[in-house]
Image (cartoon, rainbow, N blue to C red):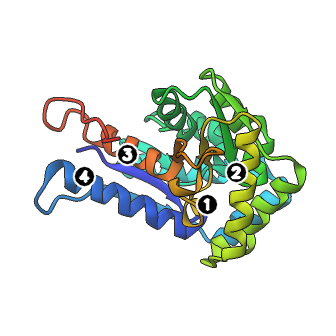
Amino acid sequence: MKMIGLLGGMSWESSIEYERMINRGVREALGGTHSADLIIRSYDFTQIEELQAAGEWDAAGALLARDARRLQDAGADFIVLCTNTMHMVAPAIEAAITVPFLHLADATARAVLATGVETVALLGTRYTMEHDLYRGRLEAHGLTVRVPDGPDRAIIHDVIYEELVKGIINPDSKEAYVDIVDRLIDDGAQGVIAGCAEIELLIGPDDVTDVDGAPLPYFPTTRIHAEAAVALALEGARGEVVEPDR
């Protein structure tokens, strides 16, 4: 089994989900008392949030790149960044290490395309929705990406930072999210990417339907990324590639 280096704490609610899913996936694959071989760098999220708010993406990239290198030097066989938004600095991380970096947008795009969906809605922080480094990575796989309009982006972003990262689950916020999803589906989205781990705490597959109430594909990026990490960690563990269940 390969050792996974996790960059987490952005927020810790999402990091815990990564750890839980990865450990459970390894146990389900190998049985017995098996769990994942992990090494973790978890941040005080305020430090990262302040860099985001100030637009200090180069500084944030340098910070994460330095710690990714530390995980590599400590024995990590590949690196997983446990957040969508901070994949904006993925190029800095990739340049700092020689082990593989398991990019969340690549794993997500593969999962979307496997369902036959070509046009997909993206929900996330405003950084994820508005900047090209993440959306562009999805589009490079041939996807058409829809994002909410300006006021709806503000709602999505504010709920994440003012409620979800603090563990607050507000039914009114869920209703607002579902309304936004419905508008994106009316705009042609064939499925929805939950492009922030905390979003998965608020809405799930049952909240993504067409006008007749039929379910549409829902892509929880935390689960998709965690399953890809398990597959890579167990690659060759039994002489073959272990594919994540779908």
Q: Residue at x 67, y 50 (%)?
A: 85
Residue 97: give its label.
none
* 198 shown above or below 208: below
Of badges 1 and 4, nearer the viewer stands 1
Question: Label 4 sits on what residue type?
Answer: Val
Question: Label 2 sits on what residue type?
Answer: Val
Q: Residues within 10 Å of mark 4 (few under 14, many from 20)?
A: many
Task: Give the Cα distance between marks 3 and 1.
Answer: 18 Å
Q: Residue at x 69, y 49 (%)?
A: 123
Whichever of callouts 3 and 1 sits on the residue coming sooner in the sequence is: 1
Question: Label 3 sits on what residue type?
Answer: Glu
Of badges 4 and 2, nearer the viewer stands 2
For disc 1, the marked residue is 199
For disc 4, the marked residue is 26
Whichever of callouts 1 and 2 sits on the residue coming sooner in the sequence is: 2
Q: Residues within 10 Å of mark 3 (few under 14, many from 20)?
A: many
> Which quarter of the image is occupied by the C terminus?
top left
Residue 227: give its label.
3
Of badges 3 and 1, nearer the viewer stands 1
Task: Give the Cα distance between marks 4 and 3.
Answer: 9 Å
For disc 2, the marked residue is 181
Is residue 237 visible in the rendered image? The answer is: yes
Question: Label 1 sits on what residue type?
Answer: Ile
Task: Give the Cα distance between marks 3 and 2.
Answer: 25 Å
Whichever of callouts 1 and 4 sits on the residue coming sooner in the sequence is: 4
- Residue 197: percent from left, percent from top: 56, 58
Of badges 1 and 2, nearer the viewer stands 2
Labels 3 and 1 touching (C-beta < 8 A): no
